Amino acid sequence: MLAHVAAWKASGQPRKSYCSAHGLGLHTMAYWCSKARREQMPGGFVPLEVGAGEGLELHYPNGVRLLLPTGTSMAQVAAYVRLY
């Protein structure tokens, strides 16, 4: 099913059209799409590298990077982490 998710994304078709053409149920495809999304996200904790520099850089799973200046409060950093 994960191969179908990848093929559907590559096809550019609406999900409903792809499912109809391949005899797949919409709810089944939705389940596997969400499973594929979860597998792409790192789970649990990730290592934190601390060093002298210009600030703290957050890397979100969707590729967005956020550079926070040195001295940003930990409460504000926590709020940015929870944004995703």
Image (cartoon, rainbow, N blue to C red):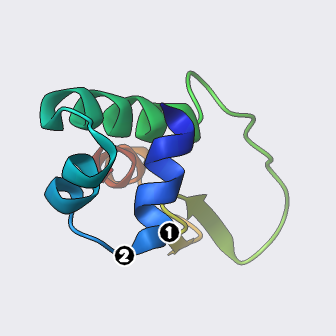
Quick one: which residue is furthest to the right in this view? 51
Residue 25, above or below 16? above
Q: Position of residue 81 (x, y in %)?
A: 39, 47
Residue 40, above or below 67? above
Quick one: which residue is furthest to the top in this view? 44
Residue 53 location, quadrant: bottom right
Q: Report the disc number at residue 65.
A: none
Residue indicated by mark 1:
10
Q: Report the disc number at residue 12.
A: 2
Q: In the rendered image, is residue 25 in sight? A: yes
Q: Dot 1 surroundings within 10 Å: few (below 14), some, or many (20 or more)?
A: few
Q: Amino acid at mark 2?
A: Gly
Name the residue located 36 percent from the left edge and 31 percent from the top edge.
32
Q: Position of residue 50 (x, y in %)?
A: 79, 49
Q: What kind of element bears circle 1?
A: helix
Q: Dot 2 surroundings within 10 Å: few (below 14), some, or many (20 or more)?
A: few
Q: Is 23 in front, or is 33? A: 23
Q: Position of residue 17 (x, y in %)?
A: 19, 61
Q: Is 51 in front, or is 38? A: 38
Residue 36, above or below 53? above
Q: Amino acid at mark 1?
A: Ala
Asked whether the residues under the numbered discs 2 and 1 touch, taking CB atoms below 8 Å apart as contact, a structural biologist would say yes
Q: What kind of element bears circle 2?
A: loop
Name the residue located 52 percent from the left edge and 35 percent from the top edge.
2
Q: Is 45 in front, or is 76? A: 45
User: Mark 2 to mark 1: distance in Å?
Assistant: 6 Å
Q: Is 13 in front, or is 79? A: 13
Residue 34 location, quadrant: top left
